[in-house]
Structures are given as C-alpha cells and as structure tokens.
Amino acid sequence: NKFVPSVDKVKSTSNSTDVWISAATQGLIKYVHEEMEAYRLYTVMPALVRFVTQLTNWYVRLNRDRLKGLESGDASDAETGLQVLYDVLLDVTVLMAPFTPFITEYFYQHLRKLQPSYAEAADGGGASNPVKPGKSDSVHFLTLPAYDEGRLNESAVEAMEALQAVVENGRTCRERRNISLRTPIKCVTVVLRNPSANVVDSLNGPLKGYVLSELNAWELVIVPKEQEHEWVTLSLTPNFTVLGKKLGKKMKDFKSHVTSMSHADAVACLEKGSLDFENLTISATDELVSKLAFSKDGEQWESTSTPEGDVVVAIDCTQDEAILSAGRSRELINAIQQLRKAAGLDIGDKVEVFYEEEAGLSVVESAVSNNVEAFATKFQGSVPLPKKFAPSWSVELRSGTAEIGGSTVNVYICRPAVAGKDGLSEEVLYYLSTLEPADVAGKDSLELKIDGKEYTLKEGVDYWVSAGAKLKDVK
C-alpha cells in the first residue's frame, strides 16, 4: 500500500520504543527552541548529534526487523513503526536545517515526496505561501517545528535510559569474557539502585524482549530490593571535595569508618539520609558517594557497573551444549543472510537452503535440529537441510563457505523446487522438475500422461512441495 504520513497514527502507537523516540524528539524540539531563544547556539549542535545517535543506534536497531515487516507478520505494526520513523526524520531534518543546510536539503527532497501536499508544488506552487512540508520547494522555507507537549513522556525516557545502561554493560561483560554476540548467554541479572516502579515494570514487561535480543540472552532477572544483598554490596566513601574543610584531620578516621560499613549499615545510612560522626552530621546525599559492587560467588559470573555505581549487570557465562548449539545456528543464519544479500534477493523472496559438512562431522546438522524454530521464524518456514536431500534439479542461486563451530561448511541457497519420491521413473522426475511449488500447492494429486502411459501422483507420497516437506514425511 502507498505510504501516507499520519500524525494520528504516530500519536496512537503503544509500542514502548515508539513512545520513547517520539517523546525524545519533542523534548529535543523544546530544548532547541529554548537554547536558540537564549542565544546559546553552541549547546544545540551537540544535542542534535546525541539525538541522531539515539535514533540510529537504538530506535532503528531495536526495530530493524519490525520496520521490515519481519517481526510478527503484522503489516499494520510495521506501518506504525515507519510512521513514527518518518515523523521523527521530518522533524529532525527541519530542526537541523540551519546547522547542516546541504544534507538536510537532500533529506527533505526525498521526505517531501510522501506528503499529500507535494502535489501542490507543481507549476511553481512550491515557492508560494502557505508554507507546508511537502509543498515547499526547500527545507529552508519551513519554520522550526513546534513541540507537542502531549507527546513528552519522562517515564518512557527514563525506562529507555535504564535499558541502554543494561545493554551497554551487558556488552562489556561479553567482551571481557570474549563471548561473541552470536553465542547466547543463559541469564542477565540486573541490580538497580532505587529504581522507580516504572523502570522495573518496563524492563520486566515491554522492554524485556529488546534486552534479551540485544544481548542474545535467554533470561533477564531484575533483582528485587529485598534480595539485593545476595548479589551486591553497597559501599560508601567520603566526598572529599565537600568534606575536606568540614572534617579536616578527622578525614582519615572518617574514611576508615564509612569504608568498613557493612552492606546493611550502608543501606540504613542512605535510607536515613545522614550519618553521625563525632558530633558531626554527615549528609548521605551530598557528602557521601555510594556505589554498588557485584559480590556473588561463582566463576560463571562476569559483572560490571556504571561509573556512578547505580546499575550492576552480571551475565551467566556457562557454555553448555545447548548454548554452543544455538551459537552455531546464529553463525549459519548469518552465512545465509550474507548469501541472500550477495544474490540480490529481497526480504520476501523465498529460497531453500542446503549445507554440506566435512566428512564425518555433524556439527551443523545438530545445531539445525536443536534450533528448528529459530530457522523457521527467520526464513519464512524454511529450515536448512543437508545437501544430499536437495532435488537433482535444484537451481543454485548462490553458494559459499562459512566457518561454523570450528569447521568449514559449504552453504547453498536455491530456488524453491518440488521434490519427488526416490525411485520414480526418469520421465516422471523430469516432469516434476518442470513444476513450480505454487503449481502443486494445495493439490492432493497430479494426473499426467507420458508417452501414452497415465500416472496418478499423490502429494505426500510421490511428490512434495519442498525438500523440507519430503524430509518430514520420509523421517
């Protein structure tokens, strides 16, 4: 269907990342207006650059499959994502125009073509009033967009900041253990210091899938406050800059006192908001620095925390056969995707995939059999098969080699082909080789005559719509 921008669809979305990027965009517009009115132009460009990073590295990355229509098969959800992305791109293009005039003009000339008012630009109308996105011949004819207060959403921004902290620290943990992102990890455990109910509910709810996807993890655990002591230790240190004059020579003794406090005592101090020391009251808010540190025993854990010490992320690095098998399947998926790209295939183009391992090895076969659902979801129901199951008439579109599980594997992508029963006559097999899967889909049988001899072929017995369907029945 033809894409028509709709702000109403943008405002009606319930997707957490849509709500966040819309709120962030409106917040940016508000900020730019405030700073430019105060003539603080030097603060605007850094904010714009930070936003572009958020848009590309987070919103687009988190929604890449959704925007392509691959995530749930729901075309309306994909369109909603595209509506939000278009709305953000148009606003930011106009917002950045005074600072980057040439690249934004290029963006605008492409974005304007989707606007209903674009037709009004014909015969010189694009240079006349009223000014409209689409109708106007240049982005520099447009005024800066006004922010929509109704789309500002601090809760969505707060939750997204927490997600980013978890993902970034989880990636650091992976790097420390040299675990590739293609290899899953069993569990990501997160400890947040005094999180709001909104953040906890978001990470346990709508944002959970994004965290698991970005870290390629099977489970996410947000540790509740009553269990924090099992995972982390809260430590306190003096804020030397603030306390230097106040304590003077007592600083050394005070430092020893606070650094030796137990986790429970440190927590109690922060909850009270102050600490008494030698007839002095020390503010826990301004005069103490608090940090969380991972303290759970076990070599399977790798942990890290934010510089402020308010978020601790630990990953379970256990590498059992299920984990390794899932990692190999991701390597094969990547190899297939590269071949599809090299063959110039579109997202909706269906293919059959076959592979050939070194003699005596079954690493890939085991990985595929243990992760059938993952392949079926990624490739529209098609699951890679050993090359020996490919019909002799399969048309190879592209092939290549890949290193999977430490061994070299040949991978082939082929046009979908009808599969025939082993032992059928050459004439019948030749006839089947001329058919497309669409020719036999939904048919229970085929009637044919070759050299005066009549044949009745039954689906599921004599022929199948694909090699995969044949393998299921034959097994």
Image (tube, rainbow, N blue to C red):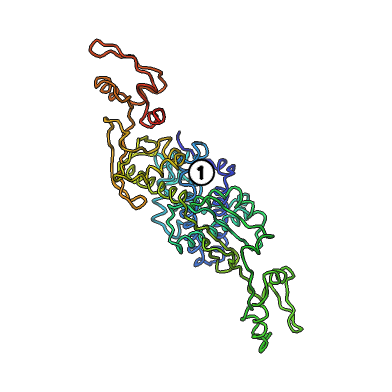
Dot 1 lies on which element?
A: helix
Count the numbered circles shown: 1
Residue at horizontal 34%, vertical 42%? 340
Residue 374: percent from left, percent from top: 45, 42
Residue 41: percent from left, percent from top: 50, 66
Residue 187 vs 432, above or below: the answer is: below
Location of residue 307 (image quadrant): bottom right
Residue at horizontal 40%, vertical 19%? 443
The one of 249 and 81 positioned closer to us in this rendering: 249
Per the image, the residue denoted by label 1 is 81
Seen from this angle, which residue lies furthest right? 279
Residue 427: percent from left, percent from top: 24, 19
Seen from this angle, which residue lies furthest left? 451
Residue at horizontal 73%, vertical 74%? 274
Residue 408: percent from left, percent from top: 30, 49
Quarter of the rendering occupied by the C terminus:
top left
Residue 352 vs 22, above or below: the answer is: above
Visible residue check, residue 69: no
Q: Mark 1 belongs to which amino acid?
A: Gly
The one of 125 and 336 positioned closer to us in this rendering: 336
Visible residue check, residue 250: yes
